[in-house]
Structures are given as C-alpha cells and as structure tokens.
Image (cartoon, grey):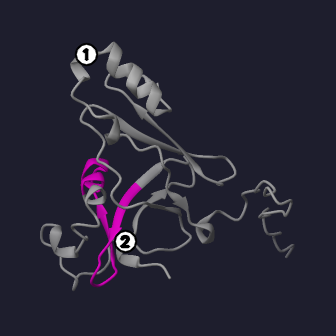
Amino acid sequence: MKDNSQETPKSLSKRSHSISKYAAQCGKCFKWRLFDTQEEFEDIRSKFIEEPFYCDRKLDVSCEDPADIEYDASRTWVIDKPNIPKTPEGFKRILIVRRDFSKLDSYYSTPTGKKCRTRNEIAQFIKDNPEYEDVSLSDFDFSTPKVMEDTIPEHVVRKASANGSSNKRLKAPKDDL
C-alpha cells in the first residue's frame, strides 16, 4: 500500500520531456501543491520524512483551498523518493526522461556547466576545483523518480521487458467517420 503522504512528484511536459512542475502532496488533505522553484521543491523533499509536507507550510494556503494541480493523464507524472539531499548551491540536478518513458536519467550540472553522470565524476570535479572542497559527495543522489505508468502518453512505444514480454503501448486508432 502506498502512503500518499510520502509522495513528492514532478510532472513532465509531454512536449519537451523535461520537468515542468514541482509538487508535493499534503499529508492531511492529500491535495497537490505546486512550488515555484526546483530549489523550493528540493528543500521540502530533502526533509520530507522528518517534516512531512502540509498545505499550511505554503504562505496563505490551507487544506480548505482547492488543489493547485490534479493528478491525471494530462501530463506524465514521476514520483521522487523522499529525503533525497538538497542539491548543493551552484549545482543543478537534471532529470531527462527516456524516449520510451521507461525511466529518467539523472545527472548534475556543476557551477562551471560540466555535466556529471556519476559520483566519481563529481569527486573529480571537486578535486579539480578546490573552491568546492566543502561540498560533500553525500549531497549528490543519482537515483531517479519513478515514472507513473498510468500517465504515460498513449502514443509511446515501450521496449520489451527483460523477461521477453512486451510492454508496448500503441497509439489508439482514430475513428474513420
């Protein structure tokens, strides 16, 4: 059973395949609340277990207000794990959805614009740039959010799974009227 109060989702724009909205679900009323920035979302997510999100943590918002966004298939949703560390200042966590929507790939962009795909690459960047020696490797988490299957666009063709079964979703035929 999924504990909805532990969900911190992101939604993908169907056109660009990039994160377009950041939201968390209230642990009391279960309404989704949007955040203006990735940084604000990461702050909530980084301490979600110790400090569950409630509507009143947002200025002038309460559980009595309508939800900011509804969970539906108008966009693809991904659910991030709670308590992923907040990205260190100057760095940016970037998530890119694969063409078949099977998963997202994560990497970090450094303050100099270099893309790092592994913790070893981050370590090398820190070694080569002593001004970042106070940045901890434990602040970089390459785990990726889970793509919510029921929100994947119908036209997406999925690859066959490892056990040989097909997970393909074909575009529905249009009526010829």
Q: Position of residue 139 (x, y in %)?
A: 32, 41
64 displayed left or right of 123 = left
Q: Position of residue 10 (x, y in %)?
A: 43, 59
Q: Whole-Å distance between the Cαs marked 2 and 1?
A: 37 Å
Q: Quadrant of residue 61?
A: bottom left
18 displayed left or right of 35 = right
Residue 112 can be seen in this image: no
Residue linked to disc 2: 6
142 displayed left or right of 152 = left
Residue range (magenta): 21-43
Name the residue nearer the viewer: 63 or 134.
Answer: 134
The kind of residue tagged 2 is Gln
The dot on residue 26 is none
Near mark 1 (Cα within 10 A), the count class, few <14, some 14-19 or many ≥20, is few
Measuring 22% from the left and 75% from the top, which residue is drawn there?
55
Measuring 83% from the left and 74% from the top, which residue is drawn there?
175
Measuring 12% from the left and 71% from the top, which residue is drawn there?
60
Say what secondary structure mark 2 lies in: helix
The kind of residue tagged 1 is Pro
Any magenta on residue 159?
no
Q: Position of residue 157 (x, y in %)?
A: 77, 56
Measuring 78% from the left and 63% from the top, which residue is drawn there?
167
The dot on residue 130 is 1
Name the residue nearer the viewer: 8 or 32.
Answer: 8
Near mark 2 (Cα within 10 A), the count class, few <14, some 14-19 or many ≥20, is many
Q: Seen from this angle, which residue lies furthest top?
A: 128
Say what secondary structure mark 1 lies in: helix
Name the residue nearer the viewer: 111 or 128.
Answer: 128
